[in-house]
Image (tube, rainbow, N blue to C red):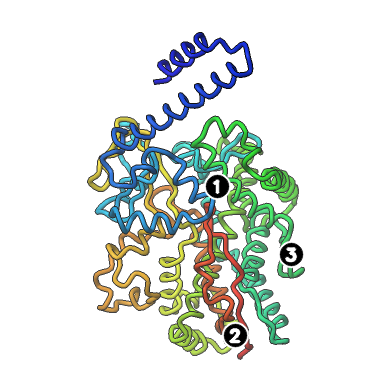
Amino acid sequence: MSTSLFDVTAQLGSKLRPTSVEGILNLTGAVLVAVVVQYVASVFYAAYFGPLSHIPGPKLAGGSWLIKSYYQRQGTLIGWMTHLHEKYGPVVRVGPTEVSFITGESAWQDIYGFHHDASKTGKYYLKDREFFSITPSGVWSMIAEDEANHSKERRLFSHAFSEKALREQEPLLQRYVDLLQMRLHEESESGKLLDLQKWYNYTTFDIIADLAFGESFECLSQKSYHPMVVMTFKAAAAISMKNIMSHFPIAARFSSLFIPQETLKKRIEFYDFTKSRVERRLAMDTARPDFTTAILKHSDTNRSLSRQKIYANMGLFMIAGSETTATMLTGTTYLLLMNPDIMQKLNAEVRGRFKSANDITIEEVNKLPYLLAVLTEGLRMYPPVPIGFPRVVPRGGDTISGVYVPEACKVYVSQYHANHSPRNWVDPEKFAPERWLGDERYAGDNKANYNPFSFGPRNCLGKNLAYAEMRLILAKTVFSFDMELAPESENWFSRNKVFSLWEKPPLMASLTAVN
């Protein structure tokens, strides 16, 4: 088709002889018409005869990336994809080479699971690097690495996220959780409304900074965001925009025209700041239970990482280990505030178990069945990463949950939509912790589709840390305070947007100290 377009343009050029302004305008118009005709033809071909034409979905979105990109740019991808899955079913084509799954007998395993013969067949479902963003130094973090490099880097850091490491890290976690409680007491005494979303972010960013860099961001101490936190938010937004640009190669060359300069600037600043903080931590003469200890332990072995690799992965931990945990806490708190009966049951369990906040430890909160069920249900209804991480179908194509998908296409299980589908859950829009406590009303739930920390050999490395933070923070907060949602936040969820991660509005509530 490109050759015929060239021929048509050449013929028009020879006939129109653009030696005058009129001729130039005529030639320009003819070329534009030819380009539009070619584009429309390519959209039509992809929609009706392309590699995914056998999979249900809107024809226009199947022929052009413009449709999905529009909703992605607006932050309204969740609503659009909800409509698609309601209309077309559990497997939907959302782009020319992209498929979203929300149910099926084996979608999680087929896409994300262990493939024991992959080393022989070469059929690895590699991460889609167009979804992620490479660091300014040109090095990938392990989230987007190939299987061999990911395995090497994951082994190196795994000790820092183990149960043993978590026990050693607990005093650090407790210090920040207690500081959060102290700040909430101070701020609530005047009776003013508090933005819980902000305070959760302060806490999780302080914790992850201390674990990654050996020093806090002092968000809780200063009662304000550290500049690095703002950089983190902007870096996440840049990843979303880079993903959109990846579908339009010509436009991607001029990405600076489409992505706000401030966003691009903050992305560079995020990397530079991470680099400087890593160097400061590496220079510390201390053996503390943090992420850097494993790096120093293997610094003189064949398992060591380059400086650029260390910077890339510490930057990954900053984003993955902070904002996502705060998101989970914010969403669950909102759901509790919207369901006072559930909040009352949780208060009764926590306050009935402990006499003092000092008694609330990681070991003890793991013995609170209703608290665990509340957080599990919160993760179902408000997953921190709402859209699944895409994988690339290997050479030769493959069958995923009974549906054939050609090679090089992008596939994923969309967390939010899988978690809200009536195909998987009884009363999916109901916040019901009881579904995780053996209640017969929810016997029809398909819990195999619940994987909030992903699935398989590349699932979330930091889930133990995330669980510990969420349980400690929520337990100590409900032990210490009665909370009431402010009227202005009653429609909080509907004001959320998604740019790779959730962009959350303030969650305003009044707190009254108890105990």
- Mark nearest the camera among 1 and 2 is 1
Contact between marks 3 and 1 (CB within 8 A): the answer is no
Q: Which residue is mark 2?
A: 481
Name the residue rendered at 54%, 71% in the picture.
492
Q: Left of 459 or right of it: where is 164?
A: right
Residue placed furthest toward the left: 402
Q: Where is residue 53, by image quadrant? A: top left
Residue 511 image offset from top left, x and y in percent: 62, 84
Instruction: In this rendered view, identify the residue nearer to me: 284 or 490.
Output: 490
User: SS at mark 1?
Assistant: helix
Q: Which mark is residue 218?
A: 3
Q: Which mark is residue 240?
A: 1
Name the residue rendered at 60%, 50% in the picture.
237
- Mark nearest the camera among 3 and 1 is 1
Residue 242 image offset from top left, x and y in percent: 56, 41
Residue 503 image offset from top left, x and y in percent: 57, 60
Q: Left of 331 or right of it: where is 188?
A: right
Q: Which mark is residue 25?
A: none
Name the residue rendered at 64%, 74% in the picture.
195
In which quadrant of the rendered image does the N terminus lie? top left
The alpha-carbon separation of the residues under discs 3 and 1 comes to 28 Å
Instruction: In this rendered view, identify the residue nearer to me: 5 or 252.
Output: 5
The alpha-carbon separation of the residues under discs 1 and 2 comes to 37 Å
Q: Mark 1 packing: few (<14 Cα in 10 Å), some, or many (20+)? A: many
User: SS at mark 2?
Assistant: strand
Q: Earlier in the sequence, mark 3 or mark 1?
A: 3
